[in-house]
Amino acid sequence: MLTTTTLTKFHFQVQDCHCKTHQNTLKKKKTRRMAGKQPKLIEDLLKLLSMGEALTETQQKTMNDYKFWKTQPVPALDEVVSEEGPIDAQKTPEDVPATPLPLLSEFEWLTIDIEAKSQLDEVYHLLYEHYVEDQDATFRFKYLHEFFKWALKAPGWRQDWHVGVRVKGLGKLVAFIAAVPVTLQLNTSGHVIPLVEINFLCIHKKLRSKRLAPVLIKEITRRVNRQNIWQALYTAGIVLPSPLSTCRYTHRPLNWLKLHDVGFSHLPPNETKASMVAHYTLPNATKLPGLRPMEMADIDAVFDLLNEYQKKFELVQVFNKDELAHWIVGGEKGSNVIKAYVVEKDGKITDFFSYYLLPFTVLNHPTHSELGIAYLFYYATDSYKQDAAVYKKRLNALVNDALITSKEFGVDVFNALTCQDNTLFIKDAKFGSGDGLLNYYLFNYRAKAIDGGIDDKKQAGENGSGVGVVLV
Ligand code: MYA
Ligand code: MIM
């Protein structure tokens, strides 16, 4: 057992290691402070308040307050990007230390073998207890074993990119971070960037605020750099230097009564429970002729359809066929992780959509312990080159059928971000704004801001977005 007394004696001074081998050779960028902007402060505060957003500590942080992030190759908060490209000049893997960063003697690095059930179990338990929660700690993400196998074993995955920290004496896993390789394309410049997605950063609740996160981030950076990869894509709810884009979560209730019971949705004034249930009721059968579950045999057709469709967004993930097979059809047989459907007309695949299943643990509730949640993932349709109204109607029809198919997997709420062209159906398909935002970040790359589908009040817009990449 990890006790508070054991933990308080740990100090984390070594994390900002300045020894020669581990020193970052970053050129110290001059960061323009918010100097001379004081009169705007009240105006800004009022603006934030009018958005209905809580004024968090994070939003008040300026570049200098980011003691770790200001040392990293990321754009400064108030930086205006004119030229897109890497921030740190290319190094070679030989410039990168071959051995892990030092940790305090109480801890040790641990490369997790997620193919070993017991080690996957450890990751599962750490995240089950300590991973991301909603703003008022009512829910926590519940990533299942099958989900990790899918999310962490994408083509090109490496075991040493599944990084853990454990307490030596106790053997207990107390922190985790992971990288998986993907290829991104910025359609603004046409730049293709082989990079990693960083995800599942998690530190045991009793070890928080001790500057361990920067150590994990620097260690995964080292391991990725050793493979000659110098950029990363990641998302977070908090504001860091500097978001490339920001999306909002939206939610389409399927099982409104349960959502209400657990505090996920509230009863609006002038409505009754019965009227809410009626409002969200869906037919049992899908409507699109030719809709069926996607099979491996559809990969070639979906590959062409998706690659063509993705050109309409500014930031996209480039899939080769192996990657597409993995990310869209690749869950283990019979597992409830990723679902994909195609529409086939006269032997031709005209549309496809996919969603992944990721429940919430309901914290401290007498009767419910879990919420079934689907997240819209990649989709494509050949109707996008037609009239805007035709395209919009088609997206609505696809999403409506996606909602209907998800009912059989115990989904209580279907979530979608404001990315892709989701804002074209969000209103009509009865998705409502959530209280969560998602910021997209690039590491060691300057790029111009991308429209995340939200307006200046940070609410879902109606004109689509430039973001064509979805993380899990
Ligand atoms: S996002 C999901 C993150 N996980 C959670 O939210 C789970 C619950 N929370 C926790 O486990 C902890 O609170 C975490 C922070 C681990 C988040 N991304 O150790 P600390 C900065 C980046 O004292 P703790 C995901 O997985 C913070 O601003 N930085 O803090 C993507 C401060 O720096 P600065 C973050 O609360 C992750 C410093 O850490 C985040 O104990 C992408 C404080 O450290 C965050 N989510 O631990 C990671 N949260 O002083 C970046 C806090 O400067 C990858 N911080 O403000 C970068 C690319 C690397 C690869 C490059 C390859 C080329
Ligand atoms: C997961 N993928 C992930 N990451 C990276 C990539 C890591 C985390 C990224 C940031 C983050 C943090 C926290 C959450 C998501 C993402 C959980 C969260 O806060 N989710 C919100 C939510 O579910 C997203 O909006 N909110 C619900 C909500 O808004 C519940 C709120 C309870 C109170 N806090 N419900 C309202 C539904 C209602 C809307 C109107 C119509 C009817 C339904």
Image (cartoon, rainbow, N blue to C red):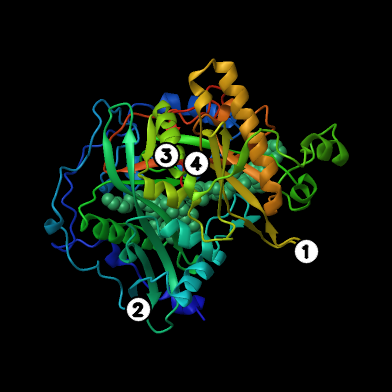
Identity of the amino acid at label 2?
Glu
Which residue in the protein does label 2 denote? Answer: 106
How many neighbours does mark 1 have within 10 angstroms: few (below 14), some (14-19), or many (20 or more)?
few
User: Helix, strand or loop at disc 1?
Assistant: loop
Q: Earlier in the sequence, mark 3 or mark 2?
A: 2
Circle 3: is it few (<14), some (14-19), or many (20+) Cα within 10 Å? some
From this viewpoint, is residue 245 visible? no
Question: Residue at position x 66%, y 55% from top?
Answer: 138
Kind of residue at badge 1: Pro
Label 1 vs label 3, nearer the camera = 3
Q: In the image, which disc is placed on residue 73? A: none
Residue toward you, 359 or 295:
295
Which residue in the protein does label 3 denote? 303
Residue 70: x and y in percent read: 29, 45
Q: Position of residue 223 (x, y in %)?
A: 26, 60
Q: Earlier in the sequence, mark 1 or mark 4?
A: 1
Measured in 3D between alpha carbons, the distance from the residue under mark 1 to the one under mark 3, in whole angstroms, is 46 Å
Residue 279 visible in the snapshot: yes
Which residue corresponds to mark 4?
A: 438
Instruction: Identify which amino acid the numbered label 3 is placed on.
Output: Phe
State the residue position of label 1: 366
Q: Earlier in the sequence, mark 4 or mark 2?
A: 2
Res 301 → quadrant: top left
At mark 4, the secondary structure is: strand
Q: CA distance from mark 3 to mark 4?
A: 27 Å
Cα separation, mark 1 vs mark 4, equals 30 Å
Q: Earlier in the sequence, mark 1 or mark 3?
A: 3
Spot occupied by residue 345 in the image (x, y as percentages of width and height):
58, 31
Spot the residue most to the bottom: 169
1 vs 2, front mark: 1
